[in-house]
Image (spheres, rainbow, N blue to C red):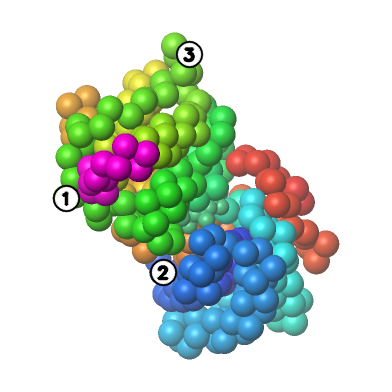
Amino acid sequence: IITLAVETSCDETSVAVVKNGREVLSNIISSQVEVHKKFGGVVPEVASRKHVEAINMIVQKALDESNITFEDIDVVGVTYGPGLVGALLVGLSTAKALAFANDIPVVGVNHIEGHISANYIEHKDLEPPFVCLVVSGGHTHLVYVKDYGDYEVLGKTRDDAAGEAFDKVARALKLGYPGGPIIDKLAKEGNEEAIDFPRAYLEDGSYDFSFSGLKSAVLNYLNSKKQKNEDIVVEDVAASFQQAVIEVLVEKTIQAAKDKGVKIVTLAGGVAANEGLRNLMRKRCKEEGIQIKYPSKILCTDNAAMIGCAAYYDYIKGYRADLTLNAVPNLKLGEKRY
Ligand code: ATP
Ligand code: MG
Ligand code: FE
């Protein structure tokens, strides 16, 4: 089964060709990051326009690189949510037009399910059940993956997403955008015990997360240093902040794996690229006798190959959308809107 996949939920225009769900024949990713950098974040209207400009060329590149023509394609998979509505609509219109013109079925893919599925591409023998920590720019979910397409969300953030916290703290430190990779790099040079930022474990047994208190603590720390005219060691702030985030992420994930009795933990989403998180999760999983898996960095952040993988598993289950498939900006994990 050959899937052509389209992803435009945020600021990456991406098209991929994927064989049998796990073999990537091409995965073209065009990032708009340079455009949004000067605004310090993604500007939705600009994102939509840039997708329109890029999408046809990206489709062509994905086909060229995979040596595949439309005759070979069995299904078109497209992200229909969650994401920015205008951005999603560009991918949806493209996918539906291609499907209609070539008489190929369409399946709508949940972007978060795509992030989780990136693990299937990276690890060819990975199968559910496992626990997945989804940490991206807009989401922080602790998910029990019971089977393909069968998810139990154990907990989620009550305020900021993990990636959002990284980006906001980076912004306060005037480090640039997106902040996650920059903080990750600086943290390696800093002392994670330099500043005692709060860890929000919430109520006993809760799998929810909260990062806005930590973000405020960092802002307060920076303000008070400025007021006292004291020097700020950016590397120490980065390392201490990052440690406060990842300790909570790791401990809750390990606890979830134990509670569910699963022996595999996976990471997904842009923040899964974080080296501090990967290292601490590896260490703690080893201590607990749990396997840890995560995608390579390029499959952690937004890409269409992960959408092609999720689309494949929906397709073989019999899911088919039609040309009324619409964008659902707040689509929940495990929810189908077609
Ligand atoms: P969502 O998937 O929730 O809709 P998104 O698609 O914008 O949001 P992703 O592409 O999954 O998010 O990830 C982008 C986020 O990952 C940004 O917040 C970025 O700062 C963060 N990120 C990327 N690399 C790293 C890293 N090495 N360390 C920490 N954060 C990182
Ligand atoms: Mg992005
Ligand atoms: Fe994403």
Horizontally, is 297 left or right of 178 in the view?
Answer: left
Q: Classify mark 2: residues with Cα within 10 Å, few (<14), some (14-19) or many (20+).
A: many
Left/right placement of residue 209 relative to residue 87 reads left
User: Which is in the foreground here, disc 2 or disc 3?
Assistant: 3
In the picture of the structure, the residue carrying the numbered disc 2 is 24
Which kind of residue does numbered mark 3 sit on?
Glu
* Residue 293 placement: quadrant: top left
> Which residue corresponds to the image point at 55% horizontal and 65% vertical from the top-left?
39
Query: Circle 3 — which element?
Result: loop
Mark 2 vs mark 3, CA separation in Å:
42 Å
Give above or below for 286 relative to 112. above
Nearer the observer: mark 1 or 2; the answer is: 1
**Vertically, is 177 above or below 193?**
below
Q: Amino acid at mark 2?
A: Val
Magenta segment: does it hold 256? no
Q: Which residue is mark 1?
A: 189
